[in-house]
Image (tube, grey):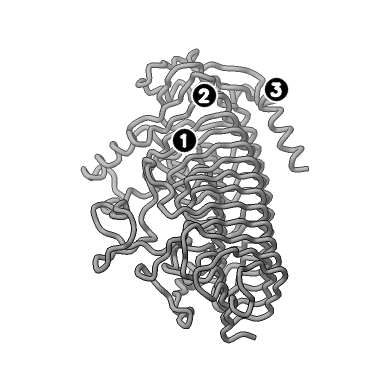
Amino acid sequence: MLKNKYTLLLMICLTGGSVQAIDKTITAYGAIADGRTINTKFIQEAIDDVAASGGGRVVVPPGNFMTGTLFLKSGVDLHVSLGAALLGAHTTDDYQKLYGRAALILANAQHHIAVSGEGIIDGQGQELMVDIFKKLRSGQIKHDSSWLFKRPSEGGRAMILYFRGCNDVSVTGITLKNASNWVQDYRECDGVLIHKITVQSTAYWNNDGIDITDSKNVRITHCFINASDDALCLKSENPESFCENIFVDSCTLRSSASGLKLGTASRGGFRNIKIRNLTIYDTYRSAIALESVDGGFLENIDIRNVIATNTGNAIFIRRGRRNTNGAVGTLKGIYIANVKVQVPFLKPDQGYPLEGPPDHLRPGVDKTPKRPSSFHIYGHPFLPYNLIPSSIAGLPGYPVEDITLENIEISYGGGASKDIAHIPLHAITSVPENEDDYPEFSMFGELPSWGFYIRHAKGIKMKNVKLSFVDDDFRPAIVMDDVNNIDLTDVHIPTATEMPMMLLNNTSGVTMKNLVIPVSKEKAIMKANYK
């Protein structure tokens, strides 16, 4: 049913349905392709005329057309032809906002809208930031003080696409470049098709490749995303709404943050999410991050067929409580299968225009780490944590529930050293809870295992899971703390430096079948406060 709906929408947009009743070319309205004339009024007039005529295409022909904010209207397909480029204006005066968020193309409560073509929409984020900083320093515009030591708030920067409360949205074929904010956000929309688009946006921080916020019936297929922030991110910022019926297939993701991420903003929730066939590479944080930390729900998530190379972390699952005075959200019903991840020894996104920040490094001058000099960041010496394992972590009394990991293979760079950090196994409960911290795989600091760290969890199944390292690691492969009902079937840990290979603390209901390890279970497994 869902597939048929999106197939119909794609046919309408590509083969002459209602949104292609007429074509209007922006040059017929006076638009000039010199790369510097502000063509906003000409392009907007074309959009308004086509919408008033019952719908059709507004065509951007080959050439470089600069513009400020455009408002897309119902029934209109903004078609950027091969060889054409819409260029974002360089000054904030040319941008307008919707609910406090600026964008090059805005749509509010519209229906049957599309952005199509093989051309480029370039936000020119670096050029826009020059104007923003100039005005901040002169006092012409005011933001919170964060810009003085970090960056201007998101409200002052510009997305490329921001569609809110829209129905039947199609974005196909296009290339989106160089946003100074999130590249695109589809917020509280119903019926979104994103197909064969390219996102090449490393011009500034906080520029997620694709954001789906509290939207339903979304299909994202055959896209390439290279972004300085999360590549593909689902958010829920409205406690009265949620993301539901999302399907993602055959996408390639590169990020200086996380590849696939559900959460951070998780006030409402996420339900019925299916992810298939992802290729993830050179990603600083997690390949897969699932987070419920703001009181919402996260359930019925099905992720299959992921290959991630050169990424900082494989899988991060977190039930937390940033809303310290509110209810604790839920996280349950997760199935992740057919995943192969390679976590390197070195920083995975080094050399990209905007690398991930050193948020899992800590300052230290008393010891010299056995690491290359590239770990001296911004001229200051940093002592890195040992490589951080995948984690499944809830809160005391609020466990992560019903998680299945099947056909998982993770290779770590290894190389851990007790000279860098060491949590003795008798001090395993010293790992901080950090219940209200921003959720990231590095949020707990040093962890006592190299493969998986599982804490405050219930109903965990690991089937055909293989964990290995390249260089020696002194820590156990798996540490469980306050875990109930865990089933380990065909778990392979082929090498170990020290014993134990697995630590079970305050854990009950453990079933092990076909555990493949180089020593006996009696030697490999340590149990403390075991029930």
Give the farthest residue toward the left: 138
Q: Nearer the viewer, residue 379 or 467?
A: 467
Residue 83 sits above or below residue 454 on the image: above
Percent across and percent down for residue 283 are 47, 48
How far apart are labels 3 and 2 at the CA level?
18 Å
> In percent of the image, x 67 and y 73: which residue is there?
486
How far apart are labels 1 and 2 at the CA level?
13 Å
Element at badge 1?
strand
> In percent of the image, x 65 and y 44: which residue is there?
277
Q: Which residue is mark 2?
A: 119
Q: Which mark is residue 15?
A: 3
Q: Nearer the viewer, residue 198 or 453?
A: 453
Q: How many marks?
A: 3
Element at badge 2?
loop
Quarter in which the C terminus is drawn: bottom right
Pick whichever of labels 1 and 2 is earlier in the sequence.
2
Q: Amino acid at mark 1?
A: Gln
Q: Amino acid at mark 3?
A: Thr
Q: Residues within 10 Å of mark 3 (few under 14, many from 20)?
A: few
